[in-house]
Amino acid sequence: MNNHSNPSLRRIGILEMASPDPDRMALWDIFKRRLQDMGHKENADIAFEFRWAKGRQERLASAAAELVGSKVDVLVTAGTPAAAAASEATTDIPIIMATGVGLGTQLTKGASRPNANVTGICDLPPGLSSGRLQRLCQVVPAASALAILADCANPSSPLAVRETQAAAIELAIAVHDYWVTGPEQFGETLAVMKNEGIGGFIVAPGAMFFANRQTLAALACEYQLPAMSVRREYAEAGCLMAYGAPIRENYRQAAFYVSRVLNGTKPADLPVDQPTEFEFVVNLKTAGAIGLILPQSLLDDADTIES
């Protein structure tokens, strides 16, 4: 939406790594409602400008440049690559990271982070990779090797791979990492996993994976590979399991940060936030489709869904 004809409007630029599917739009509706609850009325005193990369990182730099060139008052990003692209595009406009940013990237190093205009929510805190691997091991205890599927272009992927490999040493299980550059490589990569005897895989955090979660889930079922993912929405799309922070709260918190910035708070004065609540979701229909009988101890710990 462009509202240059009304100079009194504060304009919020949204740089999204994912696609404008109904699930993602519902999350941005949460963001908008929270802003409204805090007194910011769309088309009255604020307006939104969206740019969607649709899972393609190469689109982010130009999209970020467009938003910066249009002189938005604040940038909100979804996905680590989007946050990185925004921080490359401007050191002046406040940037609020809403989702997908891992603690330990250069964007989240607290007071030492290089861009004082960047803050927001880190929803990939340390420790979750171990929890995901432990649950996957429960599902396929006889597997000789597991895997992690990672995005070559996402700064969060190396962090997730390192943490998963460290957890694998503790659990005495082999974990191999498989790297892709785009969704067109999903099929061939999962085929290689299957041929190499992989018993199941973890999807590393990443907006490219989120944008293509239905495709990924369908291929995991096709190759009979149990998939552990990072958000409920993956399990709802057909992946076997998900363990991570509920994404809805990110958008409420991002709106709070945007409101603070619009009211004059400097981004450097808003600490990078971390989630404190996590959810574990299992898709029972997928378990049946790939011939798994899940241990009761695992189900007792999970929210179960049928998709």
Image (tube, helix red, strand yellow):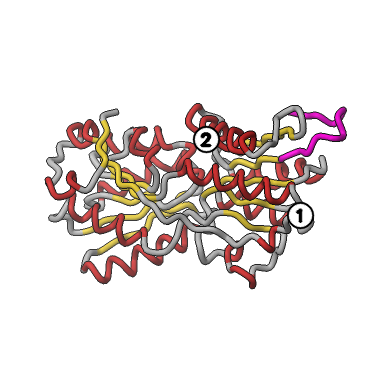
Q: Residue at 48% x, 54% y: name it.
A: 123
Q: Nearer the viewer, residue 32 or 291?
A: 32
Q: Quadrant of residue 41?
A: top right
Whether residues under marks 1 and 2 lie with C-beta atoms below 8 angstroms apart, the answer is: no
Indicate which disc residue 90 carries: 1
**Is 294 located above or below residue 47 in the figure?**
below
| Residue interval drawn in magenta | 1-12
Indicate which disc residue 27 carries: 2
Quadrant into which the C terminus falls: top left
Label 1 environment density (alpha carbons within 10 Å; few <14, some 14–19, many ≥20): some
Q: Is residue 278 visible?
A: yes
Number of numbered discs on residues: 2
Judge left or right: residue 148 versus residue 259. Answer: left
Judge left or right: residue 233 versus residue 249. Answer: left
Q: Amino acid at mark 2?
A: Leu
Label 2 environment density (alpha carbons within 10 Å; few <14, some 14–19, many ≥20): some
- Place of residue 14 in the rendered image (x, y in percent of width and height, measured from the top left): 66, 40
Q: Amino acid at mark 1?
A: Thr
- Place of residue 125 in the rendered image (x, y in percent of width and height, measured from the top left): 44, 60
Q: Nearer the viewer, residue 234 or 188?
A: 234
Q: Is residue 187 visible?
A: no
